[in-house]
Amino acid sequence: MALICLAVRATSAQRRVPSVTPSRIPVLPVAAPRSAILTLKAPGRSHRRKLFFTLLLVVAENVMYLLYPLLAGFAINAILSGRTWQAILYAAMVFTMWAIGAARRSVDTHTFARIYAELAVPVIVAQRSENQSASTIAARVALSREFVDFFEKHLPVLITSLASMTGAAVMLLAIEFWTGAGCLAILLFFACFLPGFTRKNDALFNRLNNRLEKEVNFVTHANAASLGRHYGVLASLRIRLSNREACGYLAIGSMAALLFAGTIALMAGRGGTSAGHIYSVMTYMWMFAMSLDDGPQLLEKYSQLKDIGRRVNTGMPKSPVRIERAPDHKMGCHARPDFL
């Protein structure tokens, strides 16, 4: 009897459901992935040639940075020996370095201004399709600019820092072994604290961006007391992030001071070191310390981008859009997001 009742209900349900032809089945875009890495890949794929050329200039600039302390040491020794033309070759290297830097800065603006112009529109349309408030959309469009800033400002700094840290350590291993070994020990020391430092930054940026998404609503509707609390919380979060960055700088400075003290004592005790060698060693140590000094700021940017990537739907799916449709060999249309 139960089976008969179920069959009757199924039959009546089928009568109530209207038939759907293939042409009436909606084309639905798959939601864009929410992560900083996938969001960064989307403009990276669309503008890979321009980005490749820009980053190629960054790499060339870093190669010149790595060579100049060594060449400067040779120039100093040539000056002391009276070999004028060999010393003057250093000036040609200086001009080449500045020419590459000027070309890279010119290309940067042309490339990244266009990337942001193409990114902003799909971000707005994607947030509208999710029925986000005007306050949230405005905040997320502003936050999406951070992805373009990553390519324009922070990726070159990241490449420069990594190249300078590793390059300086390798060069020091070659010309002053124990100083190079000290650089590697410092890197291992800070690597032990990296996961905890990053997790705390992630939590602070999550709270900060939660507040920023509601800022337009606060400005439009909140009373003076609520506005005071809102901006007080924003100030507190930014101060905590700044304090963490300052502590990172202090820790890096302390380790750099120990590295300089040990190296100076080693070279002074050994004696008989040429002026060019001393200059090269000191310059590579400064290069290592200054590159390491960029670490706290880059870690903050990494945490910020991770949080923005979880929030902002750029409307740029990682893979081709999938659609639901009835099996019909005549349907050969390609799926596209609604805003295209």
Image: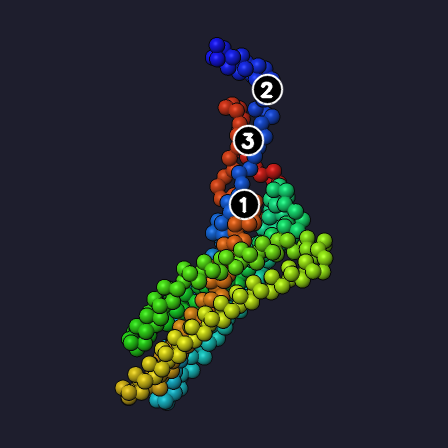
Q: Which residue is mark 2?
A: 17
Residue 207 image offset from top left, x and y in percent: 55, 56
| Residue 137 seen anywhere in this rendered image of the structure | yes
First in sequence: mark 2 vs mark 3:
2
For label 3, the SS is: loop
* Left or right: where 120 falls relative to 179: right
Circle 3: is it few (<14), some (14-19), or many (20+) Cα within 10 Å?
few
Q: Earlier in the sequence, mark 3 or mark 1?
A: 1
Image colouring: rainbow
- Sort mark 1 into few (<14), some (14-19) or many (20+) by Cα contacts within 10 Å: many
Rounded to the nearest angstrom, the CA distance separating label 3 from label 1 is 20 Å
Residue 316's disc number: 1
Numbered disc in front, either 3 or 1: 1
Mark 2–mark 3 distance (CA, rounded to whole Å): 26 Å
Above/below status of 278 relative to 255: below
Point 63% across, 45% down: residue: 132
223 or 121: nearer the viewer:
223
Relative placement, left or right, of 175 versus 117 is left
Q: What percent of the width, then of the height, locates residue 267?
A: 31, 84
Is the residue 285 above or below the residue 126 in the image?
Answer: below
First of labels 1, 2 by sequence position: 2
Nearer to us of marks 2 and 3 is 2
In the rendered structure, find residue 333 and report the number of the disc placed on it: 3
Q: Pointer 3 and pointer 1: residues touching (CB < 8 Å)? A: no
Residue 102: mark in rendering: none
Amino acid type, label 2? Val
Secondary element type, mark 1: loop
Q: Secondary structure at mark 2?
A: loop
Q: Nearer the viewer, mark 1 or mark 2?
A: 2
